Image (cartoon, rainbow, N blue to C red):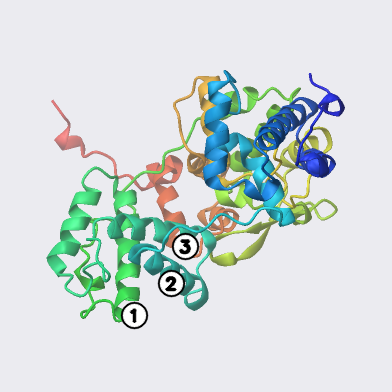
Amino acid sequence: MGDPSRVKVVGPLVPFVSGFRAELEVQGYRRGPVSDQLRLMAHVSRWLDGRRLVVVDLTPAVIDEFLVARRAEGYMLWRSAKGLAPLLAYLRRLGVLPAPEPAAISPASDLVERYQAYLVKERGLAPGTVTGYLHVAGLFLATRPEVSDLGLVALAPGEVIEFVVDECRQRSRGSAKYIVCGLRALLRFCYLEGLTTRALAGAVPAVANWRLASLPKALSADDVAALLASCDRRTTFGRRDFAVLTLLARLGLRAGEVAGLCLEDVEWRQGELVVRGKGSREERLPLPADAGEAIAGWLSRGRPRCAAQEVFTRVRAPHQRLTPGGVTAIVRAACARAGVVEVNAHRLRHTAATEMLRAGAGLGEIGQVLRHRSVLSTAIYAKVDRVSLRALAKPWPADRAVT
């Protein structure tokens, strides 16, 4: 393991060595990675000094030139712009280097920027919903011609239908509904902005869907136990993953709700969690003893010291909040370790509901835990309540016995 204090830097970057090292340590980098970054800094500084350049000369073109020279000298590590990102970000925060020049604004990017402001300010949508709508907008606008108005003035219903059919052909029903919903929102915005001459949201075809037609899929109790047992709680990664999986399986939280859980949301004395769910709603749930112990184990013997306010963070530096995608990645990694068929985080939400039903909880109680707004959202779990369904089944007529 390298010693950062033994890395010698000469040249124009010398005044920034101590500050850069301190920032890396605050972000959670260990001694070895800090030494690696300082060695890269030393190489940049020597290279600049040899060409009689100063820090402000680190333009994108000069950075590319340095990387080419580094690769030519036979270096096997830190040979791309990604490796230089921490150093360049630090220098830009100090104002020593200017922020990179923004790319030329295209008609599509300008439209997306205005659309995002509309979704946030006018409609007040949650960040996750905005991200999804912007993704759909990007897919649709990528099919439009490179002209100033993107051909939206002459956009016809047939083109809208053709996009939906082509985009949804290989998608699941849920994914197709996601495309349709996002496209309708975009077309409403375009009409309000005068970008289309007709209200084309109605031209978006609906996705065939029968409410309560599907059967909720849940993992067995043995599979859940295998997922939890796959986490090595002697390690930092294991303590974090065990706590995440416990919250998913015991309380049926969504991936975004686990990722957004803040330190102040765990009310230890009351034994409750404050959950920020869909629509920016805040609701309270009881904190089961095993879930509380799992969180406490991560906080006391795993979570790195960092500025993040969220309970769950990255283990490796930089120590930032865990994203919803990171929560899903934890579930999939646990499936691989446990030899369980790969599922996403939402499958554990179905599992929690199913287990509550098997334990005797009513649909109303399950809806409260899952925080459903409509009873119809919870009613789907009536299909797996085989005990109650058995009482409703009519006996087979004796005179119609199968021969």
The image position of residue 72, as x and y in percent, is 53, 22
- Dot label at residue 193: 1
- Dot label at residue 114: 2
The residue at 33%/50% (across/down) is 175
The residue at 35%/61% (across/down) is 137
The image position of residue 110, as x and y in percent, is 40, 68
The image position of residue 326, as x and y in percent, is 57, 40
The image position of residue 325, as x and y in percent, is 53, 43
Say left or right for 345 vs 312.
Answer: left
Residue at the front extreme?
Answer: 52
Amino acid residing under circle 3: Val
Amino acid residing under circle 1: Glu
Say left or right for 402 vs 96.
Answer: left
Residue 221 visible: no
Badge 2 vs badge 1, beta-carbon distance below 8 Å: yes
The residue at 82%/51% (across/down) is 268
Indicate the secondary structure of the residue bearing disc 2: helix
Badge 3 vs badge 2, beta-carbon distance below 8 Å: no
Q: Residues within 10 Å of mark 3 (few under 14, many from 20)?
A: some
- Dot label at residue 130: 3
Foreground pick, 397 / 151:
151
- Dot label at residue 359: none
283 to 174, vertically: above or below: below
The residue at 34%/68% (across/down) is 186
